[in-house]
Image (cartoon, grey):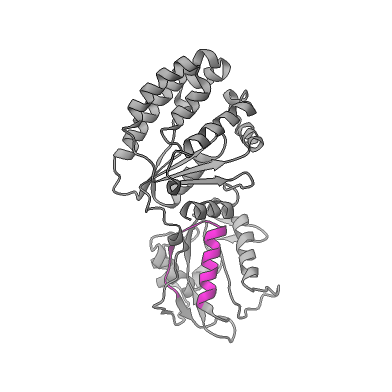
Amino acid sequence: MGNRFDFLQQATNAIFEEVGQIVKISSVYETPAMGFEGGDFLNCVLWVQSTRTPAQTLKTILSIERKLGRERSGSNQFDSRPIDIDILFVDALVEKTKTLTLPHPEFSKRRFVIQPMAELNAHFQHPVSKKNMVRLLADTKDKSEISKLSKWLRNPRKDYDLSKYNFIAIEGNIGAGKTSLATQIASDFNAKLVLERFMDNPFLPKFYENQARYAFPLEMSFLADRYQQLLEGIAQFDLFKDCVVADYEGYKSLIFAKVTLVEEEFNLYKKLFHLMHKDLASPDLYVYLYQNTDRLLENIKKRGRSFEKGIEADYLQKINDGYFEFVKTLPTEKVKIIDISNMDFIKNRKDYISILRQMLE
């Protein structure tokens, strides 16, 4: 009903923003109405990557339908509608609940669904019949006319193209979520991921037990490891990746050392740091995730690392102050400070999309 193609595009945009990354979009096909007298339908299939459960996904797409004007009557009769969104498959999951059956029970009977699905992934195997999409297309009894439109839907992922940056550094205080964000961005935008190997540092648990004794060896070991990792991770160009995303930047070493080391140790450390840091590439985009101290402490408690139990608010504030002092020295066009205190970009994709928008502003 209405501007059919525009409804498809609106639904595609909403699925990207609320459900997950759209890997691929099929052509749009026009077919006659099935099961009732009505206008022709436009159909397409999306291949989506999402962290949501099937039940959560169903709830979201029903919400998208309502926003686009779909009113479900509750009857089993077919009728015209502005939009209709169905879940066809969730990998090879076979499941039946009160609200959702997977795979879609009518899939093999509908040519207008099999054909765009075969276009997306011809070798995908139906988890029940064990037939791939090409075989299902050949075997279906639905002989309805189907015509491909010359006009394609636009993947909204193109509005969030981060490949113009060769190197993106995601920074933040302890517990801010920088590793989670860097990992998600790398997955969504085909980026090489560089993650700090802090869990491999044998001095870290000892430092939280006795800061005065272990601060210097801890910071020196971090300096050496970060230097090696960033030098190799950024210098080794990957032909199959569009950019590099790291959950830290080399200057982090100096920020933490200034808080943890006594003056004499810090002066010695600083000399060595500057000798090494000049060899490292500077990020094209430096993102600092700001989160208030209460939320940081809450996040640290949730992740349950025993050696982090003793972290205090004062220590986190000093780290935050150190980052802000550093940010002041960077070109303003390279820096994005994003306040995530009232966000949950792991559970709420809209928050994640909001962060991407701010990164690209």
Q: Would residue 339 be found to the left or right of residue 98 on screen?
A: left
Viewer can see residue 93:
no
The residue under the point 51% across, 66% down is: 12
**Picture quarter containing residue 249?**
top left
- Image-based side of 41 in relation to 66, left or right: left
Which residue is nearer to you in this view: 153 or 98? 153
The answer to whether one can see residue 216 in this image is: yes
Residue drawn at 55 percent across, 74 percent down: 7
- Please tell me which residue is depicted at 47% across the width and 35% down the height of the picture: 326
Give the residue at x 61% y 30%: 304
* Residue 26 colored in magenta in the image: yes
Foreground pick, 219 / 240? 219
User: Which residue is outermost to the right?
Assistant: 74
Task: Give x and y (percent) for residue 197.
Answer: 44, 30
Give the residue furthest to the top. Answer: 213
Measured as percent of width and height from the top left, residue 219 is found at 45, 22
Give the percent coordinates (x, y) of residue 171.
49, 39
Quadrant containing the N terminus is: bottom right
Residue 346 against residue 41 in the figure, above or below: above
Region of the chain picked out in magenta, as a range? 5-28
The stretch drawn in magenta includes residue 14: yes
Nearer to us in this view, 285 or 308:
285
Task: Establish if 187 lies above or below 146.
Answer: above
Residue 118 at x, y = what percent? 41, 67
Q: How many marks?
A: 0
- In the rendered view, tell whether residue 187 sits above or below residue 74: above
